[in-house]
Image: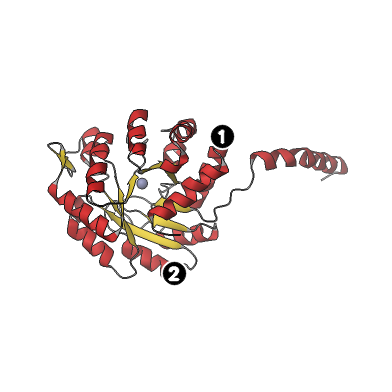
Amino acid sequence: MTRDTYFVSLLLFAVGAPLATAQERPVSLTGVIDFHAHAGPDSRPRSLNDIEAARLAMQAGLRGIVLKNHFTMTADRAELAMAQVAGLEIFGGVALNRAVGGINPEAVRQMVAFDGGRGRVVWLPTFDSEFYVTRAAGAESFVRVVQDGAPVPALLEVFGLVAERDLVLAMGHSSPEEVLLLIPAAKRMGVRHILVTHVFGQDATPDQMRRMASLGVVMELDWLAVYSGNVSIADYAGAIRTLGAEHFLISSDFGQAGNPDHATGLTAFIRALREAGVSDAEIDLMARLNPARLLGLD
Ligand SMILES: [Zn+2]
């Protein structure tokens, strides 16, 4: 570097530094929980395995992650990852797709009985949901959650187990209409923690989201949807402004082969929310407090 370029870069640094700190204050992930972390082994291509995901999350300062798999339960995997990576809360659950027998109460019973007790989330069908399958051309088998305007009988048994164990009921890829029908039914059975899985990805209208919020559930906003261009951060910010951050949590939904790791996703998400005018207090609610409350943490 010549003397002149040295002074030019010093000058640029001096001018640029205050701007950079205003716009890009470092994002702290302390206390943050990623409620939607995919990792391998999986039958879909993943960028990292459970233990690598846990290690990166811990190094980035996260408080916890929820391992999600569409086809097999993750309570056991969460316990194994916890044994390898100290200093991170790792949770799992089961998604009630066809691979575990669909709406199968026994899959839930076994999930919570596994050593370590890390199984905390029951997702309603995702890739095998009626809503998802009937929208995707070519697929024909699906798992019903609602029939003739009522929850299918096995689902009521699942709600009973979720209530008894104080688990989180996540709505999977159910339609917004199904979600609005199932929330009161689950609450009547004593379910206390309900999460509407990536509510924008399920095509919920603003009015449907308003009704979900008025039923006292938490709605998930995932970074993957913005990252892949399906939803705009302005839409998220608008919903937060209209309905209140207390009704949302933010997650990465990362883990796909080719995508960054979960902590990198959440960091970008928080930065984008700030730039869209969402306050640190609102981010705190959505990234830290609401996920912790659902999982029964302090
Ligand atoms: Zn996902």
- Position of residue 228 in the picture relative to residue 168 (left or right): right
Residue at the image position 17 percent from the left and 50 percent from the top: 156
> In what element is the residue under mark 1?
loop
Q: Earlier in the sequence, mark 1 or mark 2?
A: 2
Residue at the image position 52 percent from the left and 47 percent from the top: 284
Label annotation for residue 277: 1
Report the residue marked by disc 2: 84
- Position of residue 284 in the picture relative to residue 166 (left or right): right
Residue at the image position 87 percent from the left and 44 percent from the top: 3
Which residue is more in the foreground, 276 or 257? 276
Kind of residue indicated by mark 1: Gly
Residue 253: x, y in percent?
41, 47
Residue 179: x, y in percent?
27, 39
> In what element is the residue under mark 2?
helix
Q: Is residue 93 visible?
A: yes
Label annotation for residue 155: none
Q: Is residue 14 above or below residue 28?
A: above
Q: Are marks 1 and 2 in contact (CB under 8 Å)?
A: no
Kind of residue indicated by mark 2: Gln
Residue at the image position 37 percent from the left and 68 percent from the top: 80
Q: Which corner quadrant of the image does residue 140 belong to?
A: top left
Residue situated furthest right in the rendering: 3
Q: Is residue 103 visible?
A: no
Mark 1 crowd level (few <14, some 14–19, many ≥20, 10 Å Cα)? few
Residue 290: x, y in percent?
43, 49
Residue 51: x, y in percent?
43, 63
- Which of the two discs, 1 and 2, sits closer to the camera? 1
